[in-house]
Structure formats: C-alpha cells, structure tokens
Image: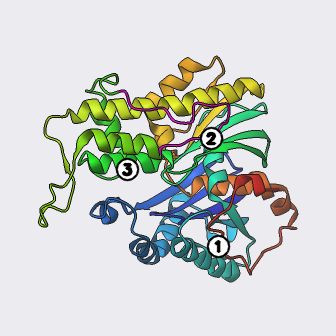
Amino acid sequence: MTYILGIESSCDETAAAVVIDGKTIASSVIASQIDLHAQYGGVFPEVASRAHVEAISTVVDQAMREAGIPYATLDGIAVTQGPGLVGSLLVGINYAKGLAMSLNKPLMGINHLEGHVYSLWLTQPFREVEFPVVVLIVSGGHTELLLMRGHGQYERLGGTLDDAAGEAFDKVGRMLNLPFPGGPHIEKAGQNGNASAYAFPRAKRDDSYDFSFSGLKTAVMREVMVKPSGDKTDKKSQLRTDISVNDVAASFQEALVETLVIKTARAAKTYNATEVFLSGGVSANQRLRAMMKKETDLPVRYPPLNLCTDNAAMIAAVAHFRYGDKLKKGTMPTDWDMDVRTMWSLSDMR
C-alpha cells in the first residue's frame, strides 16, 4: 500500500488529506475561507494567502491524526504546484518542502486541474474506468473540455474564452444580491423559478468546443440592473425592483448549463468516449448533472459533493497514479527547486 499526504492551497481552501493507494481516503481536512471573502464578493488573494499561513500547520497535523498513522509511514508528500493564486500556492509548496525535507520523503508537485479529474477515482464504491473518456472541468477559475485517453494522457478540446462557469455564477450572484459563492445560491433560487422566463443567449453555438460566458453575464446585467441616474451621489447600478430573482437565476443557470452540456455530449460522441466525467466545483450543480444524463446515452460520472470543491485528497490521488510505482521502488526524485506554476494546462502534462 502507498500512503500519500496531499496538501492543497491553490485558492481559498487550506486542505490536507491522507490517501491509500489512490482510492481510499484515510483522512481529509479542509479549512474554508468563504466567510473571509464573502464581504468582497469574491476571493481576495492577499487575504487568502495570509489565511493559508495561519491554518496550514494545524490542518496537516489534524489530517495525520485522523489518518491514525505516524509521519514516518508516509510514502510521499504531494502538493498543488499550480494553477492558482501565486501567494496561496507558495504557502503550500514551501510548507510541503519543509515537511518533506525534515522527514526525508519524496515531494511531488501536482496539477490542480488533474486533481479535479482524479477526484472521480475517490468515489466509493469505485468502478473501473475504460478509456477514452471526455472530461468537463468546471470551477470558479476554470472551464475546460478534455479527451482523456489514459492515466496522465490529455488532449484539450476546448475551454472558456473569458469567464469560467463558476466565475459567471459568482458575478451574476452579486448582481442578484445573493451571498458568495454564487453557484449554490443561484441553484437554490432557481429551484423556485421559471427557467423560460428570460431568453438569455447561448454563446459560441459553433463547431468548436470553446465556451464564452461574458456575453451571458452582460445580458443578465442589462436585464436586471437600473443604470445610475447621472446624479453624482448615484454611482452604482441597482437591482430592479420589478424582476423575479428566482426566475432570473433559473433562466441564467439554464443558459449556462445548456451550453456546457451540448458541447460536452457532442465531444463524447465525436471521440467515441466510453463515459462523460464531470468535475470541479460547478459539477455539484444538480441541473448540470441531470441535463448531462439526459443529453447523452453514455454513463455520466461525477464526484460526491464533498469532493467537488477544492480538497487535498484529489491531489494525493493524482500522486499515486502518476508516481506510485516510483514510490514503491524508492526511485522517486524530489525537485527541491519546485516553484509555483500559476498557469499550467493539462495538455502540457507528460
């Protein structure tokens, strides 16, 4: 068996987890920063990095205690190297370096997006994967459509040209005066709304696999906001009083989800995929899951809700499937010069 400690600090979650053989979670601890950033309506990078510094030691120690193993039992330490916020990533990487050096354990830098893919390997009971599969990663910072031909083998089919899906949810949530993060609150409001009330646009209706959500966001803004009157004291747009927040939320969600689903289902058919994978924070959206199942005849796999958002178990899972053999043989080298990779595409992985 391989025991890998994962550390994740790419954005606003400080997380640590111990995973056995890439599939079994021995422990998973997450310190959320949602309350810290809610007042800003989004993640404040400097606040995030400071919160990571304060939390990381406690989170890692708690993960090890809950796993019930001594540090000496670990076969290696995996840490998110990118993509993400530079300050946040630095906290995790520097802590992981110090820990690995003190324990004389291998250190592995992991791609955060690949972590979201491998959150699906942590689903219990696990069902073996037959490649190729089409993977849709949808989160606050990323929207990417990939063809996965095998472990570590990715072909980028498309992605967002502007706002990520989760980012669009957050921005529209702010317009509607809903709490941060916008995704779950828009979904909740939309459950009591009419998804056909507003004919919001579906952008990029072409043969590509790229997405665009900035136009959809702007269409919502034009529909629901009252422009400043011109009075010097009136500098902010205000939400119209005659609109139904529930209807707007439902209609916006329908437009965004439909765009994601149609392109993903088409890609799965074109590339003869065996399954469709959904991952990332937005994969928790129940409308996305339901519409994807309806649009394709293929099995649709997605993580449990607690593994949709950022966590360290997914980082440890990647490390096992990428480096497990080297860890067992004791041939895994450690890159002590590892630095952050704020921009790191999965198509660059080898």
Q: Report the side of 114 relative to 37 (left or right).
A: right
Query: What residue lies at 82% left-to-right and 56% top-to-bottom?
Result: 350
Name the residue nearer the viewer: 105 or 200: 200
**Element under label 3?**
helix
Q: x, y percentage for residue 127? A: 68, 31
**Magenta residue span:** 199-213
N-term-proximal mark, 3 vs 1: 3
Other-residue count near label 1 (Cα within 10 Å), few / some / many at <14 / 14–19 / ≥20: many
Q: Which mark is residue 170?
A: 3
Q: x, y percentage for residue 182? A: 35, 47
N-term-proximal mark, 2 vs 1: 2
Name the residue nearer the viewer: 83 or 13: 83
Query: What residue lies at 47% left-to-right and 40% top-to-bottom?
Result: 305
Residue 122 drawn in magenta: no
Q: Which residue is mark 2?
A: 210
N-term-proximal mark, 3 vs 2: 3
- What distance separates the C-alpha of mark 3 from that of mark 2? 20 Å
Which residue of the protein is positioned furthest toward the front in this rendering?
Answer: 230
Q: Nearer the viewer, mark 3 or mark 1?
A: 3
- What distance separates the C-alpha of mark 3 from that of mark 1? 26 Å
- What distance separates the C-alpha of mark 2 from that of mark 1? 27 Å
Give the amino acid type for the residue marked by disc 2 in the picture: Asp
Other-residue count near label 3 (Cα within 10 Å), few / some / many at <14 / 14–19 / ≥20: many
Name the residue nearer the viewer: 173 or 29: 173
Q: x, y percentage for residue 230? A: 16, 59
